[in-house]
Amino acid sequence: MVSNPLTAARMGGPTTPNETRPIERILGVHEGRPGRTIIALGGVHGDEPASIRAVLAVLAELRRGQPDMTGTLVGVTGNVQALAANRRFIDRDLNRGWTAQSCRRALAGPPDDNAEDTEQRELLEVFGTLEIESPYPLVFLDLHSTSGPAAPFSIIPDVARNRELALPLPIPTVLGLEEIIDNPILGYLTDRGHMGTAVEGGQHNDPQTQARLEAVIWLSLLTMGCLRPQQLPERARYHALLRRAAAGLPAAVRILHRHGLGHNEHFEMEPGFDNFHRVRRGQRLARDEHGAIEAATDGLVMLPRYHSQGNDGFFLAKTVSRRWLALSAVARKSSMEHLLPLWPGLHRDAGNPNRLQYDGGDPPAPMLRMLRLLGFHGIRYQPPGLEFFRRRP
């Protein structure tokens, strides 16, 4: 009996292309010549089956066409138990709590682990096997859909290698989200030196969502050199599909604000808000047991919660120009970072070059702009002052 799901898939183990809630951890493996390993991860949230269908459809097409591919595509199911139950999660959000410490604890497998601890442990075992096998950093496509109406967009921990994957897609890129939510899976993988992007394909039940996520997988295989342009005659159609869905939207946005929810807090989003919906400071966005919840600043609504699980109510973002993206890329290759300690009150963390301590009162706006150019999107209170942080470049 084969116990390793990767081994089983490579030996022709069963996949379930006609089921929307597969029970297999490995949806399939398509191997070409030696090259990059691309992991298409679907169903991290169990109420998002379109991501699973998209992965299965691409794997099935690769099996039919047998292109001369370089590298390997591995389809992986995120939350098997939640998918079977058609719930976002069973005990906790699987896309939260990915720290080095929590992953060591999950791999140890304590007797009282919950459903998502089991899911996390099995995912770590799969990722660990692929890390050992690959001479290159792994490439992750973390595929999602949303509860509210949505155009497609990508989300990245803002480091150069992730931009190489996300920015060629003709959809907006969201920066700063991975640094403001509670330790998502892609942040953990980036800190391990891998590359990847999360992609929201559209609303859960929109028939176009699966098609958009399929397009993302195909175009990413092209970007990573797994397929040559002549091997993907549909590439223009995939580009057009995504470009039409994102027409009129900015190239990128940066998260400014998160409205988080407490345990068992009653929260109801006002109807009619979708991603990139422009709002003004003071505009009512939602309500809870205390009354109306208003926008803390002018901005764009992102990821409004129209489902019953999770602790993110909504986010607010601002537009980022292509010029800023180019300028930040240049800044990160320059010696600008060596100027950071010249700001009064700003100190390097001796043990971690990706963290900075600040004890100088209210941070001046020019300093904040410089920090964001260099990828320091994260900020948190760390007595006696603030800590700025970024993902491992």
Image: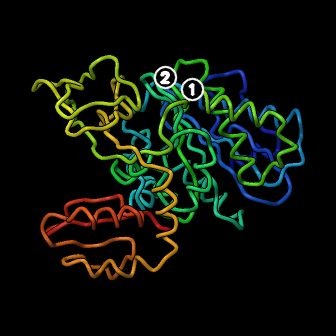
Q: Nearer the viewer, residue 223 or 27?
A: 223
Residue that appears at 62% across and 39% down: 25
Q: Residue at x 20, y 25 (%)?
A: 284
Question: Which tag, 2 or 1, sits closer to the chain's start?
Answer: 1
Q: Quadrant of the N terminus?
A: top right
Indicate the quadrant where residue 347 lies. bottom left
Residue 32 spot, x, y in % from top left: 84, 51
> Residue 298 lies in what quarter of the image?
top left
Q: Residue furthest front?
A: 323
Q: CA distance from mark 2 to mark 1?
A: 8 Å
> Residue 151: x and y, percent?
51, 29
The spot of residue 112 in percent (x, y) is 36, 46
Q: Nearer the viewer, residue 49 or 102?
A: 49
The circle drawn on residue 49 is 1
Q: Is residue 250 left or right of residue 264?
A: right
- In the picture of the structure, the residue carrying the numbered disc 2 is 86
Query: Taking 99 as reference, is 265 left or right?
Result: left
Three-letter code, disc 2: Asn
Q: For the residues carrying marks 2 and 1, which lies nearer the camera in this image?
A: 1
Neighbourhood count class around disc 2 (C-alpha, 10 Å): few under 14, some 14–19, many 20 upward: some
Image height of 83 relative to 118, above or below? above
The type of residue carrying mark 1 is Pro
User: Mark 2: which secondary structure?
Assistant: loop
Q: Residue at x 66, y 28 (%)?
A: 241
Q: Is residue 106 above or below residue 135?
A: above
CB-based contact (under 8 Å), mark 2 and mark 1: yes
Of residues 225 and 307, the one nearer the viewer is: 225
